Amino acid sequence: MIELGRVPPRRKTTPPPPAMLAFGQRVRDRRTDLGLSMEQAADVIGIHWTHLGMVERGQRSSRIDNVLKTAAGLQTTPGALLDGLPLH
C-alpha cells in the first residue's frame, strides 16, 4: 500500500538486450534514410508511433508479424533488420 505523501522507491531497470538495441538502431537508420518522421513511418508500417519509438530505443521487442510489417513499411527485408544481431 502506498501512503499519501510518500514517493515509492524507484524500480531498478535493466538495460535492453544488445539485440533489441541493434534492431532498433537499424529500424531508426532505415527510417531516417527514407526521410520519414516517426509518425509517418508508423503510419506506413501500421503500428502506433509510440510503439515504433520504443522499438527504436530498444525498449520493446517486436513479434515476428511486426518485424515483417516494419520491413515492408520501410522498403527493406526482414533479413536486413535481423541478420547478424548479437545473440547475447
Image: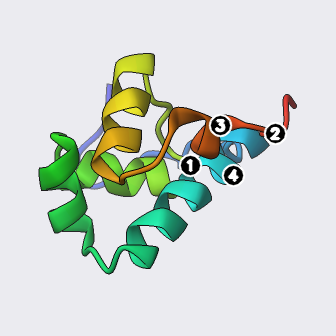
**Mark 2 and mark 3: span between their CA atoms?**
6 Å
In this rendered view, identify the residue nearer to me: 68 or 28: 68
Q: Which residue is mark 1?
A: 58
**Mark 2 and mark 4: span between their CA atoms?**
10 Å
In this rendered view, identify the residue nearer to me: 3 or 49: 49
Q: Colour scheme used in the picture?
A: rainbow
Residue that appears at 45% across and 76% down: 33
Of callouts 3 and 4, the N-terminal one = 4
Judge from the rendering whether residue 75 lies leftward or rightward of residue 33; answer left or right: left
Residue that appears at 51% across and 45% down: 59
Amino acid on which disc 3 is placed: Leu
**Mark 3 and mark 4: span between their CA atoms?**
9 Å
**Callout 2: helix, strand or loop?**
loop
Q: Which residue is mark 2?
A: 84
Please identify, in this view, whether the residue under mark 1 or under mark 4 is nearer the observer. Answer: 4
Q: Which residue is mark 4?
A: 22
- Place residue 64 in its image quadrant: top left
Of callouts 3 and 1, the N-terminal one = 1
Residue 87, position as x, y percentages in the image: 85, 29
For the residues bearing labels 1 and 4, Cβ distance under 8 angstroms:
no
- Place residue 40 in its image quadrant: bottom left
Please identify, in this view, whether the residue under mark 3 or under mark 1 is nearer the observer. Answer: 3
**Mark 3 and mark 1: span between their CA atoms?**
14 Å
For the residues bearing labels 2 and 3, Cβ distance under 8 angstroms:
no
